[in-house]
Amino acid sequence: MGKYSEFEIRTQPWFDQSNFNGFNFAIPMKTLVIYCVDPRASDIPQAVARYFGDEVYPGEMVLDEAGNRVGSTRTIFTVTNGGGRAATALMTVAEMDYLFHVQNVVVVHHSFCGTSSYMPEGLLKKFHDDYHAEISTLFDHDSLAIPDFEKSLRYDIELLRSSPAVPKHVKLYGFFYEINSGKLTEVLRDIPALRRCKEQTWISMGCFDCSDKTGHALSSRPPGRMNIFTSVQQLGSDGRRPNAFSRWDIQSQHCSATELR
Ligand SMILES: [Zn+2]
């Protein structure tokens, strides 16, 4: 027993590790937002919460009768690092998925970011020249600087998607945040079940009962249907109204489109 063992969850009488299935009952976390340490970008989690509409940030502390902090209403957790890069956030994604079942990972890069003021070679050279330190093999080279925001966002989303530390069902989003206006712009998204339909523009994913073309939100899909097929709504030609839906068959990996009446 260590000096602080009484504060470890594993030692608590109420905790049963053999039946552990996440702490979402205490904190309904579903989305991880990765963004820059720059204080001018500190409003990004609130902006993401507003964008999605069904997220809570910062939320409120949940106290028990004794005043102990037993939870929070927050649904967004944050990871900050220089530039808001995915490479150094991977461990947190894995940890938070074990503890909370991560549903979405959001990467936000912001205007006038300090890491867009140099190229990776400049940082490596400074350490080499000033500190006689070789750090080029310590970090992911392309995550050391942002030479182009669209490229850096795409790089980070692809890095997350290709990493075994990110469960394949997790939805990924890349945003650009303008620090003066506070405007958040979605640059790209990678929704797993939609990836085979890249030629289309998709706005939402749901699970359809064939007789119910209005669809359901993914979170409320009927139990057991997920293994049969996942259906999606397609953005209408007017850019707003869904006028068709598509069915992505998990077994055949085939995507078919049907007009809505
Ligand atoms: Zn920055």
Image (cartoon, rainbow, N blue to C red):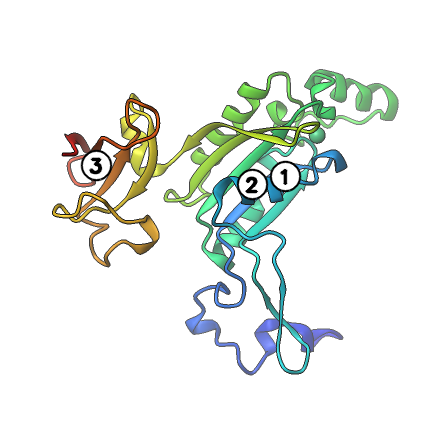
Q: Name the residue beneath numbered marker 3.
A: 248
Determine contact: label 2, label 1, CB under 8 Å.
yes
Tell me what residue is drawn at x 56 percent, y 50 percent.
76
- Secondary structure of residue under mark 3: strand
Can residue 165 be seen here? The reply is no
- The quarter of the rendered structure image containing the N terminus is bottom right
C-alpha distance separating marks 2 and 1: 6 Å
- Crowd around label 3: few <14 · some 14–19 · many ≥20 (10 Å): many
Tell me what residue is drawn at x 64 percent, y 21 percent.
146
Tell me what residue is drawn at x 38 percent, y 42 percent.
168
Q: Position of residue 67 (x, y in %)?
A: 68, 78
Three-letter amino acid code at the position of disc 1: Ile
Three-letter amino acid code at the position of disc 3: Trp
Q: Is residue 224 left or right of residue 40?
A: left
Tell me what residue is drawn at x 57 percent, y 73 percent.
10
Mark 1, mark 3: which one is toward the viewer? 1
Q: Is residue 102 left or right of residue 205?
A: right
- Crowd around label 1: few <14 · some 14–19 · many ≥20 (10 Å): many
